[in-house]
Image: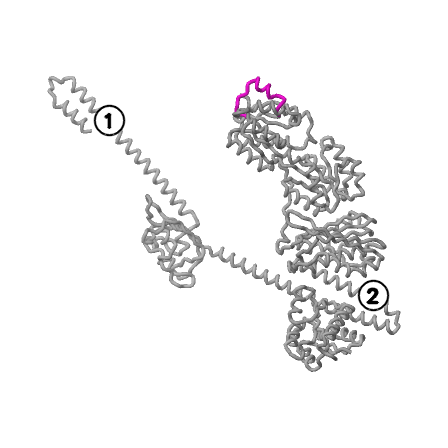
Amino acid sequence: MPRILVVEDNDESRDALTRRLERRGFDVLHAADGRAGVDLARSEKPDLILMDLNMPEVDGWDATRRIKAEPQLKEVPVIALTAHAMIGDRERALEAGCTDYHAKPIEFPKLLAQIESVLQNRTSQGVSGT
Amino acid sequence: MSEFVHLIAGFLLADPAATGGTWAIAIAMAVALAAVVYLMIRHDRSLRRAASREQNRLERYNRLLIESTGEGIYGVDLDGNCTFINAAGARILGFAPEQIIGKAMHALVHHSHLDGTPYPPDQCPTYLTCRSGKHSRVDHEVFWRPDGTSFPVEYSSYPILNEGTVDGAVVTFTDITLRKRAEEELKRMKEEAELANLAKSQFLANMSHELRTPLNAVIMYSELLQEEAEEEGLKRFVADLDKIRGAGRHLLALVNGVLDLSKIEAGKMELYLETFDTCSMAHDVIATIQPLVLKNSNGVELECPADVGRMHADLTKLRQILFNLLSNACKFTDHGVVRFSIRRLEEVGGPQMIFEVSDSGIGMTGEQLQKVFEPFTQADASTTRMYGGTGLGLAISKRFIEMMGGQIHATSESQKGSTFTVRIPARVVKGTAHEQPKLATETIDFDDTRPQVLVIDDEQPVRELMSRSMVAQGIRVITAADGEQGLQLAARVRPDLIFLDVLMPGMDGWAVLTRLKADPQLSEIPVVLLTLTSEIDMGYMLGASEYLTKPIDRQQLNAILRKYRPTEASHDVLVVEDDEPTRQVLRRSLARQGWSVTEAQNGLMALDRVRQAVPGLILLDLMMPEMDGFEFLAELRQNEAWQTVPVVVLTSKDLSPEERALLSGKVERILQKGAYSRDALLHEVRRIVAQCVKPKIAENSQEKAQNLVGAPEAGQR
């Protein structure tokens, strides 16, 4: 099953999201801040990253940029999660290198659809094969 | 004088015997002369004394003025040395007057800038005034006191002019420490307020994050548990978990709404403008709303003609608005139809997009309708329990729409359904959105002769929309928000046309229409009903002339205005006058009032003009070359089609009784140019033109007959 890295500073959100994804059969890794997220991405090379943007210290924008700067990681798709449902945010997220964008509160069925579509694209492009 | 002396000497030296009688004469003359000389001297002295008294008085007066003012005043000569200073000036500067007189003022009190750097005398405005003879004023410099302290000063230097050359300057000055302090304080307060405002928006941003995060967790866990409960067959829990999830979602919606509202109130809500295809946006919204449509077994119909095209607006906010309207429509309708239509309207201010969402649901009463856009006022408390929702959606939508420079309004009928209409400029421009549209004032100006329309409608956006489009066409619009006020205004101004909304709280349109038609003074005024099509027959029965369905379509409105407004032809005024300047003045004056004017220089040309287009009124001069006014009038009245064209005679001729008789019955009025001032004449002309060129509906033949009398009393010679 695909591996998904959840980077989210809020314990409950991270836990609930992780468990719901696991229920769908995904292999889920999680990190509580941007730095840990980048480290984990480097060591585990997930198939997809769900990145909360509003985090203390190394935030989601920053972490995404760092991931996109690494040759081995730059192909890993990142879906941004943000509490700001503003157009500026979406653009900033895409600009930082995110593949897609999901505004909180998380609508799980919609998020699942996004995850599946991103993974689908990736497989069809034959970029990676886990 | 020397001739006198010679004369007298001549007498004295003359032979006494020969001039015995002359002596007496000479003495008498000498005495008289002395008396005259004495009197002359005395008079001269008294004159001088009076002049010097006057001079003293002036001097005292000037001194009093100079000394009693709180301003400092001093004078300098061309070298910059002080010639005088008043007590206030010396006090402000901290010197005794005698310490200053004769001293170089710049070196004494104006030697340095505030920061201590020297102030070269040749840059001093007072010095420059002495050089240029020009007045100067400064309020950002300081004067220095002998103790080394300075104070902010405002001073003016005026040149002392003496027969064209500058003798020096007078400087008036004030200590503006207090003013500067107040300015500083104001600046500080403004900065503080800006900081506070920043803190507020920061607070809002934080709050939104802080409040949403735990709510997200509540929702996520309840969804998670619900899934697990279903899987493990714990049916008992499923319903309760669903309630937790529902309450969590509701609370989140509330939080979002309140934050949105506070953001709008704080002016922190921004517009993100982008260009998009209107119909694809509409299809998207319909797709999103689908689950809600199906929930109550409703059907949804979208009408979006291809020519609607693209628009430039805040896509996210527009979607939110339409989603809100559509979800309301679905929520309050069961087994019914929700219609969503989009139109593009060309308006003077640019194309407008009209979004209309109507349903066949439970509708609203007039009372509920009034409050529908206020926050936290769903139709009633039980509605919330039954239908859910935060009660904020419409309030937020309304504000979003206003931010984009648009308007929303609603019509509804209890148990029949509701219609919400949103108008947004096809091209939203940032910043202008908050400007209030210019509205017709409600002042009534009886001298103004432009056509006047009364709009009676309880919905402010409708009044505004109609006012704006009519005012743009030179129509005076007065508005009333309810039937009672409408009737009062109608009686006061007797408008040319009334637009009347049928559905109003309190006295409804039917009642107003009945009362209008029952009043003999008002019954002739045409009334256009603003209504739903189903009510038209009722309206005609009660005496309405026309109807207009809401939302108001601009083209239909214009068609009605054209119909009830004087026609194009009758809007023309033909000025027949051989004198070019007079013709010009008349043309300009009438054109300013909105009439179009054609001109002719004599009767022949005038007949040509009338043949081309029959004017609404003819202003006719009598004395003209080629064909004069009398002849023209005779020709005009012979033609059947031209007999009703009103003619006003404007003449400087003194009319004989025969001439009057000739004109009688053929012209509306005779105005004698000499009897009026130019302005009064123009005013009178405008007034008569307005009377005649109005549609004849409210005018009866008696009034017309009265207008046939000759020149006013003042015009008789």
The answer for which chain carries disc 2 is B
> Which quarter of the rendered picture does the N terminus of chain B lie within?
top left
Q: Which residue is mark 1?
A: B35
Residue A2: which quarter of the image? bottom right
Q: Can you say whether A6 is above or below B602 in the image?
A: below
Q: Can you say whether B600 is above or below B427 in the image?
A: above
Residue B126 in the figure: left or right of residue B491: left
Question: In the image, which disc is placed on residue B156?
Answer: none
Q: Position of residue B675 (x, y in %)?
A: 53, 26
Q: Nearer the viewer, residue B595 or A127?
A: A127
Q: Residues within 10 Å of mark 2 (few under 14, many from 20)?
A: few
What is the three-letter code of the residue carrying label 1?
A: Ala
Question: In the image, which disc is placed on residue B243?
Answer: 2
What is the three-letter code of the residue carrying label 2?
A: Lys
Mark 1 and mark 2: Cα distance apart in space: 128 Å
- Secondary structure, mark 1, is helix
Q: Is residue B361 magenta?
A: no
Residue B604: which quarter of the image? top right
The magenta span reads: B651-667
Q: Position of residue B459 (x, y in %)?
A: 72, 46
